[in-house]
Image (tube, rainbow, N blue to C red):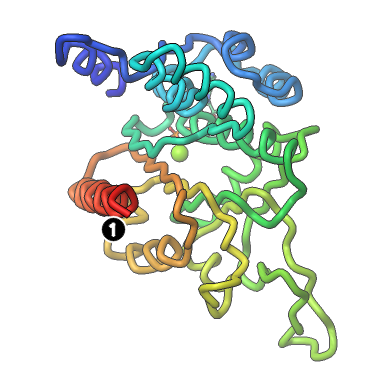
Amino acid sequence: KTIKDKKVSQSVGAHATPLYPAPVSDFSSLAPRYRISKALLRNIKDNGYSTTTEVQLAALPILLDTRAHLLAQEQSKAQQQQQQQQQQEEEPILDVDLLSIAPTGSGKTLAFMIPLIHALVLARRSQAPSGPQAIILAPTKELASQIANEGRKLALNTAVRITNVRKGMHLGSDPSPDADAPGKEVPPVKADILVSTPAALKNAIGDVDTTSHALSQIRFLVLDEADVLLDPLFRDQTLAVWNALSSPSLRLGFWSATMGSNIEELVKATIKNRAARLSETSST
Ligand code: ADP
Ligand code: MG
């Protein structure tokens, strides 16, 4: 779908600036294009992945590249230099929201997991661990556990820690008293990426104190099987987790095998919302 979109975007307008970076056909070519950590590349290889699937070849460059870099093509040299300098300082990686529709079995897990691990490897280089920065939601325990396992294999020997959230886990920054064993304290989970069902995550956060709760550092929210997460059975819980995230720079990833009306509505509303917020901030 993205590849088709690429042609469309290139044929629109007089200066047909490509809005999407070139597809990547094998994982080893990620190394010269993006500063992917050696450990991550080795893990990809060791797990038997060499050529990318269709969704990966389109989504990986979009997520690994930066908007700043792409937009720079349209700007003056001076602006570009300034931007490159800023880029080196801030590493604005994974600075896009993405909606990706690709069939079951097409390799969506790797397509969102690799850029996420890459972004967090970079983040961990410049700052000490400060609580979870990414949440991946999946509709079932089994799926969440599979995603966490896949993620851990890819994050082996990197600083990035992935936790599969289960009911009863505690995500606060302080130890909490264990209700079943009074006097005993449950240590908080230390992780960069949380993989969870919406219900288990809500349970693990407990009462959401909007100013200082455990999810205040979350910058990335991935909805895997977004069609299911947004169907009537899960919708309220999914939105409750989303609404608990307060970061103004929250980035969203919707991944699904089908483009249902539930996703379309939400994506449209989100875009509208963000546009409104952008015009608010630019007018002040
Ligand atoms: P989806 O989420 O799109 O349904 P998965 O991410 O679960 O698909 O991947 C389906 C299967 O394909 C998994 O067993 C995974 O290991 C495998 N796979 C993913 N990407 C590749 C690749 N580039 N090369 C070979 N196998 C892959
Ligand atoms: Mg999947």
Tell me what residue is drawn at x 73 percent, y 44 percent.
Answer: 127
Q: Residue 131 appears at what percent x and percent y?
A: 68, 57
Q: Residue 61 appears at what percent x and percent y?
A: 47, 20
Tell me what residue is drawn at x 59 percent, y 31 percent.
Answer: 91
In this rendering, position of residue 103 left or right of residue 7: right
Please indicate, yes or no, whether residue 115 appears anywhere in the rendered image: yes
Where, quadrant-wise, is the N terminus in this rendering? top left
CB of mark 1 near ligand 2 (< 8 Å) = no
Q: Which residue is mark 1?
A: 231
In this rendering, the count of numbered labels is 1
In depth, the one of 68 and 28 nearer the eye is 68
In depth, the one of 41 and 145 nearer the eye is 41
Q: Residue 169 appears at what percent x and percent y?
A: 67, 69
Tell me what residue is drawn at x 75 percent, y 36 percent.
Answer: 125
Where, quadrant-wise, is the C terminus in this rendering? bottom left
59 above or below 135? above
Residue that lies at the very extreme toward the bottom in this rendered image? 182
245 above or below 160? below
Local crowd size for mark 1, using a 10 Å CA cut-off: few (<14), some (14–19), many (≥20): some
In this rendering, position of residue 30 left or right of residue 105: right
In this rendering, position of residue 264 left or right of residue 104: left
- Helix, strand or loop for disc 1: loop
For badge 1, the amino acid type reads Asp
For residue 256, what is the image quadrant?
top left
For residue 121, what is the image quadrant?
top right
95 above or below 162? above
Please indicate, yes or no, whether residue 263 appears anywhere in the rendered image: no
Q: Residue 184 appears at what percent x and percent y?
A: 84, 83
Tell me what residue is drawn at x 73 percent, y 19 percent.
Answer: 42
